[in-house]
Amino acid sequence: MHDTYTVAFDTGLTHTFSKPEMGYMVLAYSLTVHKSQGCDYPYVIMPILEEHQFMLYKNLLYTGITRAKVNIELVGSVDLLKQSITVIRSTQRNTMLAKRLEYADEIFT
């Protein structure tokens, strides 16, 4: 039986965990902020990276942060984080919901 376990990440880094620490390991999956809307998770790791710069804006950042109920780790650039806090992107949706409801009201009344 092993007393320690070493995990190798694709970045080349490794981390060694003790046997008791391994008891806290849980299988985890990666989700986008969009797919996680309406859900919450105990722990969230949210990357703030240049590769995602076009998606970094205040509304999305808020949604991602509020998914975490116990702890959140923001990983990446502090400068990008500060920049994303100032960018507000509000997308107007053209679902024609009001027209559809009017039409439904005409049909069912």
Image (spheres, helix red, strand yellow):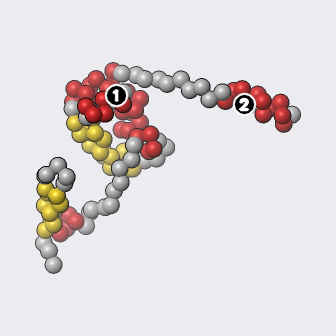
Between the residue at mark 2 and the residue at mark 1, the CA separation in whole angstroms equals 33 Å
- Residue 17's x, y, as percent? 16, 62
- Residue 93's x, y, as percent? 56, 26
- What type is the residue that disc 1 sits on? Phe
Is residue 29 depicted above or below 109 in this figure? below
> Residue 100, labelled with which disc?
2
Residue occupying image coordinates x 38% and y 38%: 64
User: In terms of depth relative to the viewer, which is nearer, 8 or 85?
Assistant: 8
User: In terms of depth relative to the viewer, which is nearer, 68 or 90?
Assistant: 90
Residue occupying image coordinates x 31% and y 33%: 52
Question: Dot 1: what SS?
Answer: helix
- What type is the residue that disc 2 sits on? Arg
Q: Which residue is mark 1?
A: 54
Is residue 108 depicted above or below 44 in this figure? above
**Quadrant for the N terminus in the image:** bottom left
- Residue 94's x, y, as percent? 60, 25
Is residue 86 depicted above or below 40 in this figure? above
| Side of 45 where 103 appears, left or right | right
Graded by Cα atoms within 10 Å as few (under 14), some (14 to 19) or many (20 or more), the crowding at tag 2 reads: few
Question: Dot 2: what SS?
Answer: helix
Let me know if residue 20 appears in the view: yes
> Residue 24, labelled with which disc?
none
- Residue 88's x, y, as percent? 40, 22
Total marks placed: 2
